[in-house]
Amino acid sequence: MPRKVRLNLKGKRFCRLTVIRFAGIVNRGSAWLCKCNCGAEKIIRARDLMSGRTLSCGCLKRSRASEANKGDGNGMWAGDEVKYGSLHDWARNNKPKPEFCEVCGKKKPLDLASIGHTYSHNLDEWRWLCRGCHMKTDIASGLRAISRREK
């Protein structure tokens, strides 16, 4: 039976990968140690390199996925139609929690409150308040809303 001739891929580039050296036989095919642009090294089969199936160590897929999931590219993105609970979760994850209430300065359990009940993606409109200050702002904004309706 004739012996297969192995291609020498050393030094060749395939997208983000540069072939460093032959790594051995994997699944009856030649495998090569490659260095990615990100600095990672990975052993990849020659057929995956040459067919274009493998373009990087995995960093390309991760970067594309993270870009695709930002803003309106995310399947869960609701834009301005976001629900109350989801917006609270977003603000809680993005606005650092201080040690003290942002109004009275007391150290108590703190709640996240939307000042003026605008419920927007603007973190400047969110405050960490103790429960007493939170109730006062809710009552005050409720009274303002009632007075606006009566006019």
Image (spheres, rainbow, N blue to C red):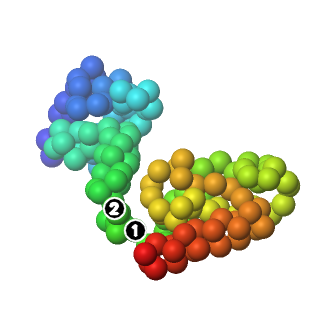
Residue at (84% x, 60% y) in the render: 108
Q: Callout 2: few (<14), some (14-19), or many (20+) C-alpha neighbours within 10 Å?
A: few
Residue 131 percent coordinates (x, y): 76, 68
| Residue 108 shown left or right of residue 82 in the figure | right
Residue at (46% x, 72% y) in the render: 148
Identified by mark 1, the residue type is Val
Residue 99 vs residue 8, the one in the foreground = 99
Residue 132 against residue 106 in the figure, above or below: below
Residue 107 percent coordinates (x, y): 85, 55
| Residue 15 shown left or right of residue 114 in the figure | left
Identified by mark 2, the residue type is Gly
Residue 16 percent coordinates (x, y): 29, 31
Residue 21 vs residue 58, the one in the foreground = 58
Residue 10 against residue 149 in the figure, above or below: above
Res 49 → quadrant: top left
Residue 115 vs residue 74, the one in the foreground = 115
| Contact check, label 2 and label 1, Cβ < 8 Å | yes
Give the structural element (helix, strand or loop) at label 1: loop
Q: Callout 1: few (<14), some (14-19), or many (20+) C-alpha neighbours within 10 Å?
A: some
Label number found at residue 79? 2
Q: Which residue is mark 1?
A: 82
Residue found farthest to the front: 151
Residue 24: in sight, yes or no?
no
Residue at (16% x, 44% y) in the render: 51
